[in-house]
Image: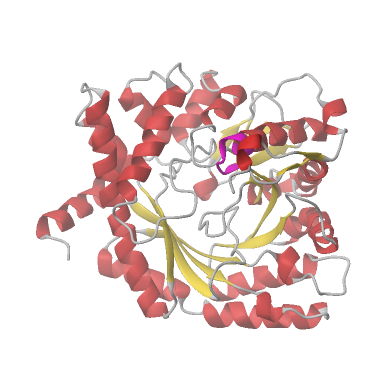
Amino acid sequence: MLSRMEIQETNRMIAESNLDVRTITMGISLMDCADSDIDRFNEKIYKKITTYAKDLVKVGEELEKQFGVPIVNKRISVTPIAIAAAGCNTDSYVSVAKTLDRAAKEVGVNFIGGFSALVHKGFTKADKILIESIPEALDVTERVCSSVNIGTSRNGLNMDAVKRLGEIIVETAERTKDRDCIGCAKFVVFCNAVEDNPFMAGAFHGVGEADCVINVGVSGPGVVKKALEEVKNTDFETLCETVKKTAFKITRVGQIVAQEASKRLNVPFGIIDLSLAPTPAIGDSIAEIFQVMGLEQAGAPGTTAALAILNDNVKKGGVMASSYVGGLSGAFIPVSEDHGMIEAAEMGALTLEKLEAMTCVCSVGLDMIAIPGDTKATTISGIIADEAAIGMVNNKTTAVRLIPVIGKGVGESVTFGGLLGYAPIMPVNKYSCEAFINRGGRIPAPIHSFKN
């Protein structure tokens, strides 16, 4: 039970520091929907999703009222479609994306993730169909999110996939250029993707998961910032202890919400993702935390160290507050979703290269970054390869969500709205990596992957 003092403190965190439960995500397995007929498959997945998730939004809204904690998003993740639909006789999965979109609208969730493929060691026929379907699927749907895992620390990097996905990103941007290339904001490329991530665009329901689970993502960068303001001129030990204690309190809120949601929906509790996920709102920024730590701007020397401190101590504090911690857990650094990051990028304090260095210690990778619309597909593939190499060698999850904005260049900006925010177009290194990307094949796993 929470004490009266803890309840009052939680209320202050909500009222003054933008504490929220960022998402309740229901993971649903589609493995039992397999069918050789694509129409029957679509019927089965629509029925299963709308049956299992029919009360998800209602329960989320009830919990908001009961606990007084904002639950910003209610979402669904499903089995990677390239796996679930592998037995279908078809040459396109666009109809599946439309079915997912229709089901998401029916139950009222914000996003549905899992239009995905896992190709870190090679392609199946279904993987190729899924990847080729991505540009059209993200064009004709509103709530569907897509991801592809192209590498792992155990298997190396599939560079054929890396090359093709650079082209897919450009094609997706072109198809959605009338909407500021929004399709690319719903697509992410992973190395070491996890099976229980509740956050979009990379959420999917892994094959090792139960038939249905509830995963919760908690966020509170504003709460951490407020706590650090109270120990502004202290040493690093005090700073770290403060982050740990604050992360514990934030995660405890998510644990209570997750347990109650699990009980009311009669679905097993999966994990708490204790990530600090920013929003465009003032006071809800990772970059502002850096400033309280003593940096003039995000991107200044010391930024990577500051992020490492934040990421590590969020995990240390949060892991004690939940029965099961999973997902991506740590600190997110999406440029368009963090007003402090946007400001730093506009000033030139934060560059793509500095962001790449920061991804060595953050919880994900290069996220929600707008780049010039004329950026070559091979250059995008090179950026994906660099980021995936960081994940592979360091045995961590890394990801790339780039948006080449057709018709716009450096100095301009793009607005996505809502939690996706807006972003300045960031410059990309002008030198070519085309010959490197065109080599094809696989990059072998690093030597330290052999741990048996």
Q: Which residues are magenta?
A: 391-398
Image height check: is 212 above or below 275?
A: below
- Quarter holding residue 326: bottom left
Q: Residue furthest top?
A: 301
- Is residue 110 rendered to the left or right of residue 163? left
Give the residue at x 61% y 35%.
Answer: 393
Decide which of 48, 170 is in the foreground and name it. Answer: 48
- In the image, what residue occupies the spot 67% across and 70% down? 100
Give the percent coordinates (x, y) of residue 237: 24, 28
Please tell me whether residue 392 belongs to the stretch shown in magenta.
yes
Q: How is the image coloured?
A: secondary structure
- The spot of residue 236 in percent (x, y) is 27, 25
In the image shown, does 151 or 96 lie closer to the viewer?
A: 151
Considering the image in quadrants, where does the N terminus appear?
Answer: bottom left
Residue at 24% in and 36% down: 242
Q: Is residue 366 left or right of residue 282?
A: right
